[in-house]
Image (cartoon, rainbow, N blue to C red):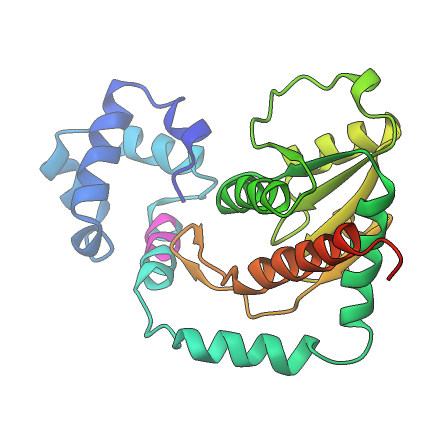
Amino acid sequence: MFTRETVQTFNELEMILYNFITKNSDKVIYMRIRELSDQTHVSTSSILRFCRKLNCDGFSEFKVKLKLFLDRNEQENLKSTKYYLSEFLERTMKGNFESHIQKMAELVLRTDKIIFVGTGSSGILAEYGARYFSSLGKFSSYIKDPFYPINSKELKNSTSIILSVSGETDFTLNLANQLKMEGSNIVSITNNKNCQLAKISDINIAYYVTEVFLGDSNITSQMPVMYILEESAHIIQQHLKNPAT
């Protein structure tokens, strides 16, 4: 609800409101505007300007949005890890899912340079993937810095393996387009195939698990990604060990 960009625009009085509301949000949703004004020593007109900055027409709408935000932040009983694993197995371990992993491995084997890309938790997995592939014989690097410079001379005969739950992150899409324009093959691993990243990829592997949010944090299980990375790395290692197979 309070984005970093919006908070940066707050003046001194608005910061007083912001600090009070974040510490007393469960009480604020039941207050009248006059009560909030008395508690914070901020005028009602300043409170209304504060509300407008948050795209609310008035204090009543602000309280409704705050209540919805709090409801969303209430931690639900998360399903067990076994549930998400079985969900993944049930939805994807059939049909042509394994063939997509095989195609990814074959593409990696044909290219000289492997680059893993991701941000946030996907960035951690990108680093893990690069290390795992390198350990099994296919040297790889990773990018999780949105300002990482791209050198086109180094991208000839390369494959970029891009990790993103949503496949809609601006940083990831911008970097994917840049890598593609420089001639790198794009393999994306996303939670579904109907996303922008999948559409610009040469190969997309979608794993389809329920997305889980805790507040603004996406805590969707990454077990499917671990499986895809490790399974493809094992296929690659077997081919490197026995080139004729």
Magenta-highlighted residues: 62-66
Residue 209 point in image, percent of width and height = 59, 70
Which residue is located at x 56 percent, y 26 percent?
Answer: 145
Q: Up-down: is 158 above or below 94?
A: above
Answer yes or no: is residue 201 visible.
Answer: no
Depth check, front residue: 26 or 125: 125
Is 230 in front, or is 60?
A: 230
**Corner quadrant of residue 74:** bottom left
* Residue 18 seen in this snapshot: yes
The x, y position of residue 157, in whole percent, is 87, 32
Quadrant that contains the N terminus? top left
Residue 202 among those drawn in magenta: no
- Is residue 122 rendered to the left or right of residue 35? right
For image coordinates 54% across by 47% down, the residue present is 125
At x 67%, y 79%, the residue is: 91
On the image, which quarter does residue 147 sit in?
A: top right
Q: Position of residue 206 (x, y in %)?
A: 71, 63
Instruction: Name the residue rendered at 17%, 43% in the picture.
Output: 23
In the visual, does 230 lie left or right of 28? right
Q: Is residue 148 above or below residue 175?
A: above
Quadrant for residue 118, please give it: top right
Q: Main secondary structure of the magenta part?
A: helix
Q: In this view, does 182 lie to the left or right of 165?
A: right
